[in-house]
């Protein structure tokens, strides 16, 4: 099967759009938690609060989003199980994923005494920023079990091709976070600690809401399979399959987050104003990535179900429809960043030194959507198909043969060198996965 066998108008554009638009809105609202913190702290009288939250959120990105494989693997096996009409396996693997999520959340919470000193020593050379970041992290880490369970249940809904429930959950949680940010930071003057308490309340609220929404479809599936028992959650073969899938995604996600945290750490070594400016720019990078990920989630769910039903034609059609839409969206995001330069910067900070520094490096932001759209889209395709080993290997090559050497040789250009390395890294991720896509297609290895 080749992609050029399709005509543009025969592609499932409506289905892709129906899945993508709620995920785009949901994903765009996700960085609003960080953007709300950044915007409100950016208007305080010191850049230390903004820098501490930048450090804290990046440490949490590594600690929390390192386990985002729970969401990705759940979407993959739920989508393929639905395509194969194998609801029993879906329930067993979902139960195992929830058990894993709760266990990992408790372990991370208990291990903070070892993790935090190491992370802050690595990422926060300024002692004042380090102290504020530690306080922020100690509060936020109590959300770990809730965040991980929410990852699994979000993956469950996306795998069912129900994108509207994640939208509702995310909007409610982020709306609560922004409201509490205003109360804790602006009204109560809790500064960075207020940002942490607001996020903690929002994350537990999201978890409880996700459980409430999941109860009905899970009950319906359980009623169809009354023979299922809790002992089946401990079947060794199912754990092996889950461990393989999650292990590949863990390595891939950890390396990706390592690059983001390395970026922030190097920003800190270039000075407080560079750190604050890059924190603002990175919030916009995350905004565009979460938006463009909407069609990645769409192709993830559609592709998984098609391959589960062994329908290669439908799989390639889903890939093609999502690609056309994602490219158009990337162009629109680039135009938005170009037109909205001044108001976007003013929204985040009124500190003259920080605003001038953001302006100096803003040009890099315009390249990111056009370079990164291929990465997000292909990530979705490979997650849905379950070919996670290829994703892991591609990430290893891009980090250690791309990002690290390029950063080393461009250190003399300081922050411009850092942004060049980051932009090239995203390009290499897309290129490597495109080669893998072509290889699997040419060799008929998708099944």
Image (cartoon, rainbow, N blue to C red):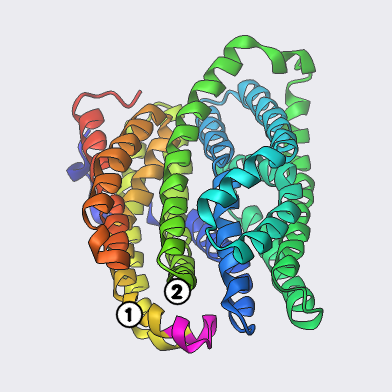
Alpha carbon separation for disc pair 1 and 2: 9 Å
Q: Is residue 136 above or below residue 141?
A: below
Picture coordinates of residue 364, whole percent (x, y): 30, 69
Q: Let me know if residue 52 appears in the view.
A: yes
Q: Are marks 1 and 2 in contact (CB under 8 Å)?
A: yes
Picture coordinates of residue 76, whole percent (x, y): 50, 34
Local packing at callout 2 (Cα closer than 10 Å; few below 14, some 14-19, many 20+) is many
Residue occupying the point 58% across, 23% down: 86
Q: Is residue 199 left or right of residue 323?
A: right
Q: Which residue is mark 1?
A: 360
Which residues are drawn in magenta? 346-355
Residue occupying the point 77% across, 79% down: 189
Q: Is residue 141 magenta?
A: no
Furthest toward the top, the residue is 236
Q: Is residue 81 left or right of residue 405?
A: right
Q: Viewer-proximal residue, 118 or 107?
A: 118
Q: Viewer-proximal residue, 349 or 275?
A: 275
Q: Which residue is mark 2?
A: 277
Quarter-of-image position of residue 196: bottom right
Quadrant for the C terminus in the image: top left
Could you say whether the residue bearing mark 1 is in a helix, strand or loop? helix
């Amino acid at each position: 099967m080749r992609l050029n066998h399709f005509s543009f108008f025969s592609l499932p554009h409506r289905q892709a759009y129906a899945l993508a638009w709620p995920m785009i809105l949901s994903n765009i609202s996700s960085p609003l938690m960080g953007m709300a913190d950044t915007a409100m702290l950016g208007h305080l009288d010191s850049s230390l609060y903004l820098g501490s939250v930048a450090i804290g959120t990046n440490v949490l990105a590594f600690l929390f989003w390192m386990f985002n494989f729970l969401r990705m693997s759940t979407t993959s096996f739920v989508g393929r199980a639905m395509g194969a009409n194998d609801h029993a396996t879906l329930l067993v693997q979902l139960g195992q994923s929830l058990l894993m999520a709760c266990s990992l959340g408790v372990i991370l919470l208990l291990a903070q005494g070892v993790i935090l000193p190491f992370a802050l020593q690595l990422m926060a050379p300024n002692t004042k920023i380090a102290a504020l970041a530690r306080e922020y992290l100690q509060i936020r880490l109590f959300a770990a079990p809730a965040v991980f369970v929410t990852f699994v249940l979000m993956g469950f809904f996306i795998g069912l091709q129900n994108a509207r429930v994640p939208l509702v959950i995310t909007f409610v949680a982020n709306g609560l976070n922004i409201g509490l940010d205003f109360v804790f930071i602006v009204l109560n003057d809790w500064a960075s600690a207020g940002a942490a308490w607001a996020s903690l309340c929002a994350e537990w609220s999201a978890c409880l809401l996700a459980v409430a929404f999941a109860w009905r479809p899970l009950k319906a599936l359980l009623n169809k399979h009354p023979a299922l028992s809790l002992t089946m959650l401990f079947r060794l073969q199912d754990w092996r399959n889950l461990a393989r899938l999650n292990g590949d995604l863990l390595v891939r996600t950890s390396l990706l987050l390592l690059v983001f945290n390395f970026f922030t750490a190097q920003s800190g070594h270039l000075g407080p104003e560079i750190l604050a400016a890059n924190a603002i720019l990175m919030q916009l990078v995350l905004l565009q990535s979460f938006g463009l990920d909407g069609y990645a989630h769409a192709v993830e769910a559609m592709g998984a179900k098609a391959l589960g039903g062994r329908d290669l034609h439908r799989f390639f059609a889903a890939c093609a429809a999502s690609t056309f839409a994602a490219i158009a969206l990337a162009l629109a995001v680039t135009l938005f960043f170009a037109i909205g330069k001044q108001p976007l910067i003013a929204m985040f900070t009124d500190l003259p030194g920080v605003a001038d520094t953001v302006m100096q490096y803003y040009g890099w932001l315009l390249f990111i959507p056009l370079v990164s759209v291929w990465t997000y889209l292909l990530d979705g395709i490979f997650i849905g198909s379950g070919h996670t080993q290829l994703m892991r290997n591609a990430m290893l090559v891009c980090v250690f043969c791309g990002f690290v050497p390029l950063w080393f040789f461009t250190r003399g250009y300081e922050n411009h060198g850092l942004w060049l390395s980051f932009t090239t890294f995203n390009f290499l991720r897309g290129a490597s996965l495109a080669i893998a896509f072509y290889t699997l297609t040419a060799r008929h290895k998708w099944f």
